[in-house]
């Protein structure tokens, strides 16, 4: 990540400027929606993920929202919510929620930068990568909960198992 630091100039301390530099460096599609907001698209193994980072100076917080489409059958919603709660018990740096009206699974995280703290390039890159990794890790469990027959506990075990190698 030290390579990214050379693309950030000392006057670019705004967290969205840093996020834009990270997206450009990683060759992700992005759109600067406003001075305080950026949207990007990142291709994962399971899905393409939509990420939005927004800076709120009043709260002194950089908020990340990473989402993907998920349209489960109504009858499977209780199983999805149970797997979602089990997933949230396993993560430290963010949480999942399901936005019913938008039919989106969402990973949310807020980085507090109180007291004029400045986010670093590594920190923002890590924040984005962890969002994608979490979505990739739990996507199969959400799929099983929505369209499979296993119990929510069995579905979450898919995400909890260590993967060794690639098929």
Image (cartoon, helix red, strand yellow):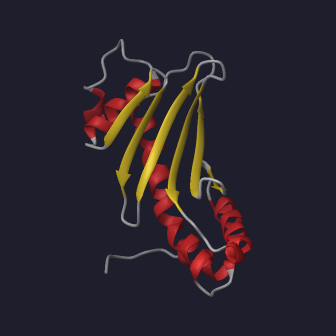
Q: Residue at x 34, y 14 (%)?
A: 10
Question: Where does the image place residue 41, in percent across and percent down from the top left?
Answer: 37, 47
Q: Is residue 71 above or below residue 30?
A: below
- Tell me how many marks there are: 0
10 and 21: which is toward the camera: 21
Q: Residue 61 vs residue 4: left or right?
A: right
Question: Where does the image place residue 54, in percent across and percent down from the top left?
Answer: 52, 31
Q: Residue 29 vs residue 147: left or right?
A: left
Q: Residue at x 59, y 46 (%)?
A: 108
Q: Is residue 37 above or below residue 42?
A: above
Q: Quadrant of the N terminus?
A: top left
Q: Is residue 131 above or below residue 5?
A: below
Q: Is residue 37 above or below residue 68?
A: above
Q: Residue at x 32, y 76 (%)?
A: 166
Question: Where does the image place residue 63, in percent across and percent down from the top left?
Answer: 57, 35
30 and 95: which is toward the camera: 30
Q: Residue furthest bottom?
A: 149
Which image quadrant for residue 76? bottom right
Question: Where does the image place residue 157, in percent across and percent down from the top left?
Answer: 59, 78
Q: Residue at x 58, y 70 (%)?
A: 142
2 and 43: which is toward the camera: 43
């Amino acid at each position: 990540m030290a390579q990214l630091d050379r693309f950030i100039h000392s006057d670019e301390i705004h967290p969205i400027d840093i996020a834009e530099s990270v997206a450009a460096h990683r060759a992700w599609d992005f759109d600067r929606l406003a001075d305080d907001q950026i949207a990007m698209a990142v291709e994962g193994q399971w899905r393409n993920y939509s990420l939005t980072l927004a800076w709120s100076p009043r709260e002194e917080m950089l908020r990340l929202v990473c989402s993907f489409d998920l349209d489960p059958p109504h009858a499977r919603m209780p199983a999805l919510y149970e797997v979602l709660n089990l997933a949230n018990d396993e993560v430290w740096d963010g949480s999942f929620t399901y936005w019913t009206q938008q039919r989106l699974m969402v990973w949310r995280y807020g980085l507090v930068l109180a007291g004029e703290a400045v986010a670093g390039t590594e920190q923002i890159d890590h924040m984005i990568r962890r969002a994608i990794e979490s979505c990739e890790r739990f996507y199969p469990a959400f799929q099983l909960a929505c369209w499979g027959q296993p119990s929510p506990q069995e579905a979450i075990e898919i995400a909890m198992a260590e993967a060794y190698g690639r098929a």
